[in-house]
Amino acid sequence: MIQANQYLDAKGLACPMPIVKTKKAMNDLEEGHVLEVQATDKGSIADLAAWSSSVGHQYLGTVEEADVLYHYIRKGTNEPEVEKTFEHTIPLDEIQSQEGLILDVREAAEYSFGHIEGAISIPLGELDSRMTELDKEKEVYVICRTGKRSDLAAQLLAKNGFKKVYNVLPGMTEWDGKIEKEI
Amino acid sequence: MTVNKWTAAKVARKVIDQEELFILDVRNTDAFEDWKIEGQNFEYVNIPYFELLDGVDEVLTKIPADKEVLVVCAKEGSSIMVAEMLSEAGREVGYLEGGMRAWSSYLEPIKVADLKNGGELYQFVRLGKGCLSYMIISDGEAAIIDAVRFTDVFLDFAKEKGVDIKHVFDTHLHADHISGGRHIAAETGATYYLPPKDATEVVFPYTPLTERLNVKVGASQINVEALYSPGHTIGSTSFVIDNRFLLTGDILFMDSIGRPDLAGKAEDWVGDLRETLYKRYRELAEDLVVLPAHFMIIDELNEDGTVARRLGDLFKENHGLNIEDEAEFRRTVTDNLPPQPNAHEQIRQINMGKIAPDEDEQTEMEIGPNRCAVR
């Protein structure tokens, strides 16, 4: 089961209604959160993907189960260029040759639709409360989509006594190696 | 302003009469670029409906106020929404009832010729998909060739003409569209013929369509003579009708030739294709009028909407019939082939009777252009 922050039932609705409803639901969603849209109109796959990219949302993917389509869209990913301040960074192409843990801090649904083999998932918003799951003495390579969330996550970990933390740059957008999916 | 509902039949008339029409296609850009309503004097603008949810004010300048405007989408819901918005902005527009789905399934019957003793030959033009089916009528009887899956159109037409359907043929096992042949035969008690070499895996009974099979339609004896012409498939068979018309199936088109790869056997069948086009067809009378099972582009339609040309003219003008060098011919039809038609493998399975998806799934599989040819 893929996790989302909000759910929208658009089952049984014909085009254009799934998109009209999705648009409304996205307005009420928090930036960076994920909406699950349940629909039965097959055309909604291509249309939601195209609409998302045209308005700057991130279309994560669709799974089909028992004739229902489950679409996942993350709000607003045309992220502004924010200066990344965490000083220990590592280029993406070097991480697979390293010992240690790859920590993926994107939303759970983003992780489900494709992550680096062996990476574990703790979304940025949950990191504070779930930090105890991690070993402070080991290397932690923090990754997200573009390096922005992982920058914040790396700072948070360092502040809490993690000694060998690295922000992986640029992030999953540039990853062209093998991916694992959990869908 | 009013919003007018247009039927696919009305749009078909515009295409055939080469009239002007401005189409606002509100499907997503990929769908539009893959496939749209083609008309020689049509103009288009593609703006996906989801970019118009907040209003149409910004696009009004792109839509002419002095032309007939038709809004088109996949099924019709979005085109109604956009048409109503345009209407509120003071424009008179129409929308296509049933959308591209209806367009894909619309057939326009056009008379090709009168045959001897009062017989008639009709071509059913499926404008949205480029498929061509045929009906031969004579003395209260009819034969149908390469029927598409909208069986009611053929059954109703036969009823209107007061004829009994006696023979139903498929020139080959189709990969780009779902055949209606055996369903029409089941409904009417007609004999259904299929080339045995294409039918090794079919799971229903059929009558073998073999070389030199000669069927008479009606008391006036219109001749329907089979001619083995492999290459698109190994069983592909052509027909000579009334010694005047050559039905080529998917072997020879107006401006292109059949592709040998849709059953995954391009290398095996390219030699057969060569033999058919450069030897067997060469032995036929040049005055035969070629009637193919597809057209590729709307320019191939004649003024009356039919797709038909003299065999001798095709020998002169069709590039695929004029590649002297055999190696070059082989390269042309095996390399750089266009993308395969949507869902072609599933469509073959349906035509073999192995799977029977519901109406919606069948519609979905047939969406898009036919892509049976290589130029």
Image (cartoon, helix red, strand yellow):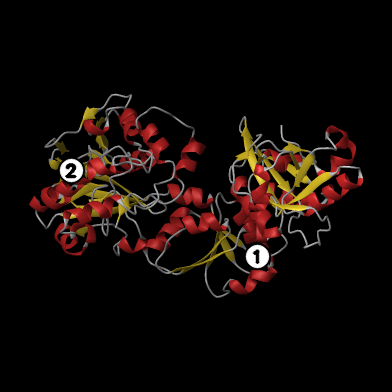
Left or right: A109 in relation to A176: right
Query: Residue flagged by tag 2: what amino acid is it?
Result: Ser
Towards the viewer: B263 or A121: A121
Closer to the chain start, of discs 1 and 2, is 1
- Residue indicated by mark 1: B87
Residue B304 showing in the rendered view: yes
Quadrant of residue A82 in the image? bottom right
State which chain disc 1 sits on. Answer: B
- Residue B229 is marked as 2
- Residue B182 is marked as none
Label 2 Cα crowd, 10 Å radius (few <14 / some 14-19 / many 20+): many
Left or right: B344 in relation to B194: right
State which chain disc 2 sits on. Answer: B
Towards the viewer: B223 or B38: B38
Secondary structure state at the residue bearing disc 1: helix
Q: Nearer the viewer, mark 1 or mark 2?
A: 2
In the rendered view, would you say A121 is above or below A170?
Answer: above
Left or right: A149 in relation to A14: right
In the picture, the quarter occupied by the N terminus of chain A is top right
Quadrant of residue B211 in the image? top left
Q: Position of residue B252 (x, y in %)?
A: 23, 52
Callout count: 2
Towards the viewer: A164 or A121: A164
In the rendered view, would you say B261 is above or below A84?
Answer: above
Query: Residue flagged by tag 1: what amino acid is it?
Result: Ser
